[in-house]
Image: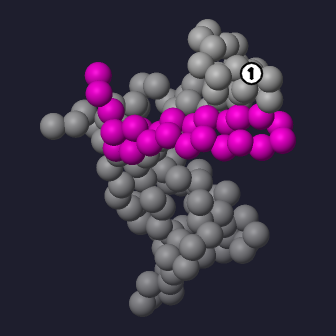
């Protein structure tokens, strides 16, 4: 499988951090850290140098294309302002179409609005990953 990969290398006093991102899926699926000694060994072309930490995630989405859409839904007008983000996420999870995943971010200007009748409307970003054509 070939992917549209982007690589970040960051050097610091603690060593070397490497991140690999699949640009089509929008996912950083490898985060690796090496201490100073190991980073120097790698840079001097020594092979099979162990990493201090390596985290893999979302491998089931690597090689796929991320699609983004929006989901709007009514909310109870009596929900407290402080509780509406949590309430909106619970509703979004319940109303989200199969195969899609809602974001848990309701901090933008478009997240909540009132329609012309005064009904509170929430808007969630939803994502899914599909096979590339």
Q: Residue furthest front?
A: 44
What's the residue at 80%, 23% (across, down)?
37
Q: Residue under label 1, please give it.
A: 38
Disc 1 on helix, strand or loop? Answer: helix
Give neighbour class at mark 1: few <14, some 14-19, many 20+ (Cα, 10 Å): some
Farthest-out residue, right: 13
| Residue 91 horizontal/vertical position (percent) | 53, 54
Question: Whole-percent x and y of residue 90?
Answer: 59, 51
Report if residue 13 lies within the magenta region. Answer: yes
Front position in the image: 94 or 100 = 100
Residue toward you, 40 or 116:
40
At x 58%, y 25%, the residue is 56
30 relative to 25, above or below: above
Figure check: 115 above or below 24: below
- Splitting the image into 4 quarters, where does residue 117 fall? bottom left
User: Which of the 4 image quarters holds residue 85?
Assistant: bottom right
81 or 17: which is nearer to us?
A: 17
What residue range appears in magenta? 1-25
Helix, strand or loop for the magenta stretch, by majority: strand
Figure check: 64 above or below 67: above
Of the pair 47 and 14, the residue shown nearer to us: 47
Name the side, left or right, on which 131 lies relative to 59.
left
Q: Quadrant of the N terminus?
A: top left
Residue at the image position 53 percent from the left and 53 percent from the top:
103
2 horizontally vs 29: left or right:
left
């Amino acid at each position: 499988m070939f992917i549209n990969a982007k690589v970040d290398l960051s050097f610091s006093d603690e060593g070397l951090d490497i991140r690999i991102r699949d640009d089509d899926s929008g996912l950083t699926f490898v985060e690796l850290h090496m201490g100073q000694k190991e980073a120097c060994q790698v840079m001097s072309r020594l092979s099979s140098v162990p990493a201090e930490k390596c985290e893999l995630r979302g491998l089931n989405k690597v090689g796929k294309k991320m699609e983004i859409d929006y989901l709007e839904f009514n909310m109870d007008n009596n929900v407290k302002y402080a509780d509406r983000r949590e309430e909106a996420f619970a509703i979004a999870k319940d109303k989200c179409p199969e195969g899609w995943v809602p974001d848990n971010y309701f901090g933008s200007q478009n997240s909540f609005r009132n329609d012309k009748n005064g009904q509170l409307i929430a808007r969630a970003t939803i994502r899914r990953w599909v096979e590339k054509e």
